[in-house]
Image (cartoon, rainbow, N blue to C red):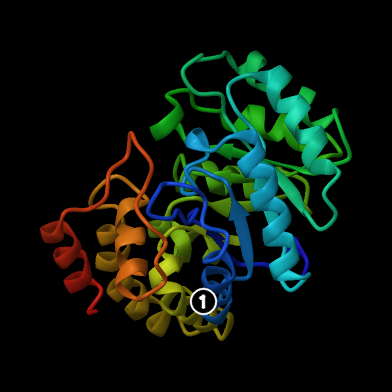
Amino acid sequence: MELKDATILTAMITPFDENGAVNFEVLPDLIEYLLEHHTEGLIVSGTTGESPTLSEEEKLKLFKETVKIVDGRVPIVCGVGSNNTAESVAFAKKVAEIEGVAAGLCVVPYYNKPSQEGLYQHFKAIAEASSLPVMLYNVPGRTVANMEVATTLRLAELPNVIGVKECHGLDAISEIIEQAPADFLVYSGEDGMAMAARSIGGNGIISVASHVAGDDLYEIYQALEAGDLEKAGRIHRQFVPKYKAVFSVPSPAPVKAVLNHLGLNVGAPRLPLVACTPEETQRILNELNL
């Protein structure tokens, strides 16, 4: 499957062992579980993968192991961006050498609060540094800076910028879909907009909830494909409390709690994030009917 054909991409958690090291032994089980529940693409070392607390060495090994396990079944997008342009450029060049990576996900620089011109030049530098296709990631709730639609559209004209994970709302998604080149990929990064983004012409969702409710997302998209809006809407309404549960405490602690409950043993988040309390875990499991 090519990236352009993937509708449900999972922003995959990074499994850790009891000592806090990346658990590469669990990784195959995690990936197979996600693929069995309709994940059509993987985002590796994104926000949900706790990229800020992964070393470069850990990230590169994680990318290579994921490529090996997936073996071409679904596209793999690797997190390569940071708030340091020079480091992002250097890292993107290294990731470009890994055969089997479909694209690099580049987040809006956090903390620095760059201007729109600064954002354009940052992403342009990364995109032009290597042959690795670049997917933009606008998530102002985490980065403070918001990439305006005009800047996204300007970047969409660059040959190596292939898409965006947009978290600034349905209006922004709508405008980008309407005005960007026809082959520009547009994904919602908000689970609650999975149905809406797809129904207005977006490619789909880059999801956290797909770790625990991938079947729901699949059924929503199947219903939309069949033109059954009533069914899609009904499943979406049942999906809402599930995705809210996944974000009821700082992510990815809820998803990790659920996966641990299911026996996948993905461990706890790394500090400064902490695991769910037993009470929080039980409340999340109740919302998911587990």
Left or right: residue 126 versus residue 175 is: right
Residue type, mark 1 in image: Tyr
Query: Which residue is pictured at 58% across the width and 35% down the height?
Result: 55
Is 185 situated above or below 288? Answer: above
Q: Is residue 157 visible?
A: no
- Between 94 and 4, which is closer to the camera in this rendering? 94
Residue 83 in the image: state x and y as whole percent.
58, 22
Badge 1 marks a residue whose secondary structure is helix
Residue shown at the point (38%, 42%) measured from the top left: 270
Splitting the image into 4 quarters, where does residue 86 fall? top right
Q: Residue furthest left?
A: 279
Question: 56 or 176, which is in the foreground?
Answer: 56
**In the rendered image, is residue 33 in sight?**
yes
Count of marks, rendered view: 1
> Which residue is found at the position 32% from the left and 52% from the top?
253
Q: Which residue is mark 1?
A: 33
Q: Position of residue 144 (x, y in %)?
A: 42, 24
In the image, residue 214 sits, relative to residue 162, either above or below, namely below
- Vertical arrangement, residue 153 with respect to residue 22, above or below: above
Quarter of the figure with the N terminus: bottom right
Looking at the rendered image, the quarter that the C terminus falls into is: bottom left
* Closer-to-camera residue (149/147): 147
The residue depicted at 79 percent of the width and 54 percent of the height is 183
- Residue 26: percent from the left, percent from the top? 52, 66
User: Residue 167: image x %, image y %?
Assistant: 47, 43
Q: Is residue 233 left or right of residue 139?
A: left
